[in-house]
Amino acid sequence: MFQGLQDKLQGVFRSLRSEGRISQDDVRRAVRQIRLALLEADVHVRVVRSFVARVREQALGDEVLASLTPDQHMVRIVRDELIAVLGEPGRELELKGRPAVVVLCGLQGSGKTTTAGKLAHRLRAQGRIPVLAAGDLMRAAAVEQLKQVGAAADTPVLEPLAGEKLGAFADRAPGAARDAGFDTLIFDTAGRLHVDAEKVAELQALVERVDPCETLFVCDAMTGQDAVRSASAFAEGTRLTGAVMTKLDGDARGGAALSLRGVTEVPLRFVGVGEKLEDLEPFAPDRLASRILGMGDALSLIEKAERVLDREETERLAERIARQEFTLEDLRDQLRQLRRMGPLTQLLELLPGQFRGADVAGAVDESRLVGVTALIDSMTPRERRNPAILNASRRRRIARGAGRTVQELNQLIKQYRQMRKLMKRTKGKWMKGIRGVRP
């Protein structure tokens, strides 16, 4: 996401960098290009207008015009204004009552059911005991889908009785959840292909019956300004306490994320950054602004590593490297841990722009990692621990068993030997770095 906007903003900053000292005309030209970039990214015109006005006012000040590094000043101004547009940082759910009721609403296909499972997973990790309520009685198989999501999140599902209407189910569900020992009730609701009066009235009636402490609007970042328009319609009909934006890991232009707070005044609370249950994060405007400007998001990358990587396994690997015992089995295990952090394209987005060129993307092609793992798995334990015994016959057998070529195997062995040499030269620094990672 944001790749197009990011590229255009980088072009603006490069043009300022090449000028050295800049004039008011240079600033106005740069601001105009920023405005066009935002509009092309599908940012709401009202948000663009106010954003550009604030950037222009600050950029025409003496600090920028007289600076020897005007591009850096402009980056700072744009970053600060992006953070202001995106709104306050997301906060955890404010749960009150027993059970605390959370209602999810939004259009059909926005990701409400998946978000319900992710929220349940997150609350379980915090020590809560959640239960899901199947409030979507309009869509075929909606209840079954929620039950599948609940099973994945290890969370049970309350479902309507045969012939039970939504109103009666809404009256019964909180008491049933409380009697069964659950402290949080997450209500999935029906969606529509568009916002209509019937949908808003249905949501209002549900909210009045269950009295939620949180009513979250779930929107799909891929829908652009439609997400903002539907959020506005829902906000007019009922009091929304926040929004969850899904598919922020996709290839949308990003206009919805930049427009939602400014147009609807509904704060973004969480963002979906993947398909796994743990891929729901509190919204961090400063991190997102840095990503938009190509500055990367090192904190998110570190947090992903801390959640996924096994500290004991990493320390064991460090010890093996220190003893020069790093084997192909160790390489395979590390690659598996890396892949658990998510698609490599997503990880690359968290790196600063200079580390995400085409060469880097090609060097960490996910299909190549799959091939490397397959080749190592095709070896015997003895061959993994001592690749020096791999003669031509063994190499043909390994390549055939992995469905790869002998050339790919030869390249793997060559890279493995280069890694061992590098680790041997830098083992002291490597050990220090590993032991300095936070638990």
Image (cartoon, rainbow, N blue to C red):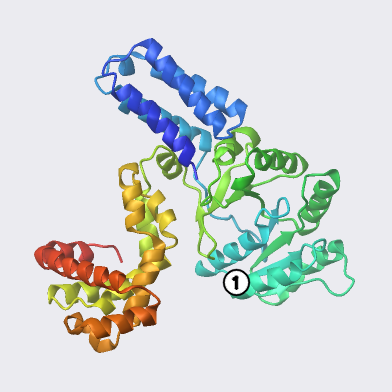
Residue projecting furthest to the right: 163
Q: Position of residue 285 (x, y in %)?
A: 47, 42
- What residue is drawn where x is 81% and y is 71%? 160
Q: Position of residue 104 (x, y in %)?
A: 69, 56
Q: Looking at this view, is 343 or 230 the one in front?
A: 343
Label 1 is placed on what type of residue?
A: Ile
Element marked by disc 1: loop
Q: Looking at this view, is 295 or 378 the one in front?
A: 378
Seen in the picture, residue 98 relative to 181 is either above or below; the reply is above
Q: Quadrant of residue 420?
A: bottom left
Q: Quadrant of residue 159?
A: bottom right
Quadrant the C terminus occupies? bottom left
- What residue is drawn where x is 60% and y is 51%? 244
Residue projecting furthest to the top: 24
- What residue is drawn where x is 20% and y is 61%? 433
Q: Position of residue 149 (x, y in %)?
A: 64, 70
- Left-right relation of 407 to 414: right
Specify whether residue 219 is in view. yes
Q: Position of residue 131 (x, y in %)?
A: 66, 70
- What residue is drawn where x is 90% and y is 71%? 163
Residue highlighted by disc 1: 129
- Left-right relation of 93 to 71: right
